[in-house]
């Protein structure tokens, strides 16, 4: 026995830095991977390359002045960030938002969810190695949604559209017909996309059963959004703790069974269909009236603290604000979806290969702007 | 290409390979075909780059390059000029000589493959009677160049890419060769010119299973998607040529497309009837068919996601290898039954066999989902 032990080669793990500059780390994420050949033994996530101190900056600005900075948190879905922050301040100051503004907000938030899932699904498939085709297709559709945002607020990436007590400007007359067209187009597109990829043998082989996130682990890590729902947790804040006017719409919460990459992909596609349903209902019911509550330019919310959360496209996005009755928040903390969803990454990728590591990482769908803040 | 006609019609009295070689026009023949081949490969590569970029653009619902020249036709030239003007950067911890040598070793064999590919009846550099063996032997050499590049770069991504490439080539060589053996049995010759002459029925119909196996294996050999693991850009950046820039990178870029063109040309020659076809001149048929095969490769690249390394191996050893063996056996029996030439009946039989085999095998075959327990 001893002789065989003497014969064994002395090997050591192969340490590869994936990131911060790498084609598929979705920004500047860095993973120090210990590899045994192709197999990932361990990873050590490193982040902070995009830290801009947004939470601290909030303390230097007025309540309204912080809204443009929320755009820079999760820059793939700025509308949702705006909504989350405005809801928090409104809850703090007890502001009532006009009906029309609520509807506009819901439409924007759901359009943003569609746009975000377009990016998420496209880039996940790109990570799987489908050479840019699914990516370009989803980006083509996202472009239509961005055109709509452009129409209402003149911006294509950082919208800065919502205001405390409403939205910054009313939707133009041609918005609703254009919205209807986009909804029709997206419905058709989703069918086409499903035909291309739902039963694709290679995608099934690559994504099914890969990177399983168990229900228990997901709950223990505080994971939310499509990633948690893919693990079979029926948890959607739009139903569980309805904010804004989500209790008026009919929609389902799609869930997965296995919690693998394929389920996360499926859940996102299903969610897009549900978002289209909400938009259809909202655009039919939208009333007239003012779009912004009558508020002074600078508000002084009463001293106190508040936590408001919304179902952002990536999961639960929360804003915790402490007010000391001055023009700026005393403290503003963001509950970043992307960072918390990364918590289980290490357990998910251990024992899989490098190719799977990239795919699992892509299927979580993070934005570095939100991870580092 | 008129000059090829001149040569073929022997107005310049240059025969393909004179029986008394090295004889009268031996060196003329060499010189002429060497120049023609190099020019041909470079022009075909430019065409391939143009087709890949434009076709991929259309398939991905974008325009593709359209700014340089009419319809972006000069894009390959612009690419080449850009890449040549780049600074040549060699990493500090690179093995300088090997790093320098790798692109050359990768490129030379690809050019050599074309020596035995007939552009027209008898129009080839050397009508070797072991043409197919020659191709199989030569085409594996560029792997050495790729591995040298990966090893000498001193970059971990490059090393991973190179290791993947060697693993893939070693595995896929076997189904590749076995599927060619079927063709050799039917044609009764290893010379590519004879194989083309024997294709009264194109071998894609007589050997449909062999064609599919060869196509898949060829894609893996030359690292076209869905088997492009060695330069998997989303995983290992650019694989073995991560650390290459300037002219050396251009060489690898050239190798990539020249290999694709070479494999398309071989598929054209041994399965699609080579230069044979009605109306158009033979060399044009050859080029058209080559580009059609290349287009199919572009098509699969834009459509399919990439497989994983263990799935790549599983596909070679559990799927392609047994099917290639069965195909070889069936072909051998058929050649025994019809010793002269396979009739049209064999076409129907073989297509039926192909459908049944692929259907049955894919029911038992699963691309593995293995996770290693740590």
Image (cartoon, coloured by chain):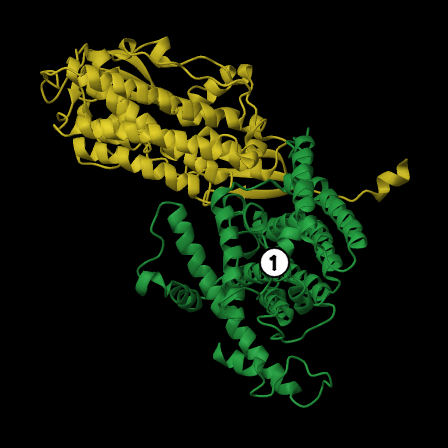
Residue occupied by mark 1: B267
Who is closer to the viewer here, B176 or A138? B176
Q: How many marks?
A: 1
Quarter of the view holding residue B358 = top right
Q: Is residue B350 above or below residue B76?
A: above
Q: Residue A71 location, x and y as percent?
A: 27, 31
Q: Residue B344 location, x and y as percent?
A: 67, 52
Q: Secondary structure at mark 1?
A: helix
Answer yes or no: is residue A5 visible: yes
Residue density around tag 1, few if under 14, some if 14–19, many if 20 or more, within 10 Å: many
Colour assignment, chain A: yellow
Who is closer to the viewer here, B289 or B346? B346
Chain ID, green in image: B
Q: Which chain is disc 1 placed on?
A: B
Q: Residue at x 35, y 57 (%)?
A: B65
Q: Is residue B235 left or right of residue B341?
A: left
Who is closer to the viewer here, B299 or A296? B299
Q: Residue B356 location, x and y as percent?
A: 68, 37
Answer yes or no: is residue A86 visible: no
Q: Is residue B190 left or right of residue B148?
A: right
Q: Is residue B298 left or right of residue B156?
A: left
């Amino acid at each position: 026995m001893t002789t065989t032990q003497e014969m064994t080669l002395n090997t050591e793990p192969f340490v590869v830095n994936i990131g911060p500059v790498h084609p598929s780390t979705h920004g500047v994420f860095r993973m120090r991977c210990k590899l045994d050949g192709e197999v990932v033994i361990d990873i050590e996530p490193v982040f902070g390359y995009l830290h801009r101190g947004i939470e601290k900056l909030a303390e230097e600005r007025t309540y309204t002045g912080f809204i443009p900075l929320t755009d820079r948190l999760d820059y793939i879905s700025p509308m949702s960030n705006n909504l989350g922050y405005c809801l928090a301040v409104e809850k703090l100051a007890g502001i009532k938002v006009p009906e029309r503004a609520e509807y506009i907000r819901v439409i924007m938030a759901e359009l943003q969810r569609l746009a975000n899932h377009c990016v998420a699904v496209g880039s996940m498939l790109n990570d799987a190695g489908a050479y840019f085709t699914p990516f370009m297709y989803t980006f083509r559709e996202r472009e239509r949604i961005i055109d709509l945002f452009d129409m209402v607020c003149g911006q294509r990436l950082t919208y800065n559209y919502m205001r405390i007590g409403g939205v910054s400007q009313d939707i133009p007359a041609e918005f609703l017909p254009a919205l209807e067209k986009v909804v029709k187009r997206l419905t058709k597109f989703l069918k086409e996309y499903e035909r291309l990829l739902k039963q694709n043998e290679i995608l099934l082989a690559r994504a099914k059963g890969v990177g399983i996130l168990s229900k228990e682990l997901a709950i223990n890590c505080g994971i939310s959004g499509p990633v948690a729902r893919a693990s079979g947790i029926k948890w959607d804040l739009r139903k569980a703790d309805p904010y804004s006017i989500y209790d008026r719409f009919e929609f389902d919460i799609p869930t997965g069974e296995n919690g693998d990459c394929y389920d996360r992909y499926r859940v996102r596609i299903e969610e897009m269909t549900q978002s289209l349903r909400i938009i259809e209902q909202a655009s039919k019911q939208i009333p007239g009236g003012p779009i912004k509550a009558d508020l002074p330019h600078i508000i002084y919310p009463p001293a106190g603290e508040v936590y408001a959360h919304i179902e952002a496209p990536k999961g639960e996005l929360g804003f915790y604000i402490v007010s000391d009755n001055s023009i700026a928040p005393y403290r503003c903390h963001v509950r970043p979806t992307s960072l918390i969803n990364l918590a289980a990454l290490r357990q998910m990728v251990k024992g899989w290969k490098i190719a799977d590591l990239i795919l699992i990482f892509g299927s979580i769908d993070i934005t570095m702007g939100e991870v580092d803040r | 290409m008129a000059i090829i006609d001149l040569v073929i019609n022997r107005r310049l009295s240059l025969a393909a390979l004179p029986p008394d070689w090295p004889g009268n026009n031996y060196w003329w023949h060499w010189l002429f075909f060497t120049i023609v081949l190099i020019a041909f490969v470079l022009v075909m590569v430019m065409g391939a780059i143009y087709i890949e970029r434009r076709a991929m653009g259309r398939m991905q619902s974008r325009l593709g390059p359209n700014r340089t020249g009419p319809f972006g036709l000069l894009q390959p030239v612009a690419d080449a000029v850009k890449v040549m003007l780049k600074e040549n950067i060699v990493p500090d911890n690179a093995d300088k000589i090997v790093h320098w040598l790798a692109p050359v070793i990768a490129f030379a064999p690809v050019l050599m493959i074309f020596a035995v590919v007939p552009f027209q009846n008898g129009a080839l550099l050397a009508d070797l009677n072991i043409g197919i063996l020659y191709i199989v032997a030569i085409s594996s050499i560029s792997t050495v160049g790729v591995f040298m590049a990966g090893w000498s770069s001193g970059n971990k991504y490059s090393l991973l890419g190179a290791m993947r490439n060697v693993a893939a080539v070693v595995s896929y060589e076997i189904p590749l060769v076995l599927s060619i053996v079927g063709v050799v049995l039917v044609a009764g010759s290893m010379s590519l010119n004879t194989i083309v002459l024997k294709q009264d029925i194109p071998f894609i119909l007589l050997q449909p299973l062999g064609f599919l196996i060869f196509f898949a294996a060829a894609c893996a050999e030359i690292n076209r998607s869905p088997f492009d693991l060695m330069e998997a850009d989303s995983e290992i950046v650019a694989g073995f040529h991560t650390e290459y820039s300037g002219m050396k990178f251009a060489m690898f870029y050239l190798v990539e497309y020249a290999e694709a063109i070479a494999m398309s040309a071989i598929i054209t020659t041994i399965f699609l009837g080579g230069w044979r076809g009605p109306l158009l001149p033979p060399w044009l048929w050859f080029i058209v068919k080559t580009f059609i095969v290349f287009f199919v490769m572009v098509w699969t690249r834009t459509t399919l996601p990439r497989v994983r390394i263990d799935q790549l191996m599983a596909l070679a050893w559990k799927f392609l290898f047994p099917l290639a063996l069965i195909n070889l056996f069936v072909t051998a029996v058929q050649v025994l039954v019809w010793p002269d030439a396979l009739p049209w009946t064999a076409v129907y039989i073989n297509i039926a066999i192909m459908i049944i085999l692929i259907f049955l095998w894919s029911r038992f075959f699963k691309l593995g989902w293995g996770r290693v327990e740590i």
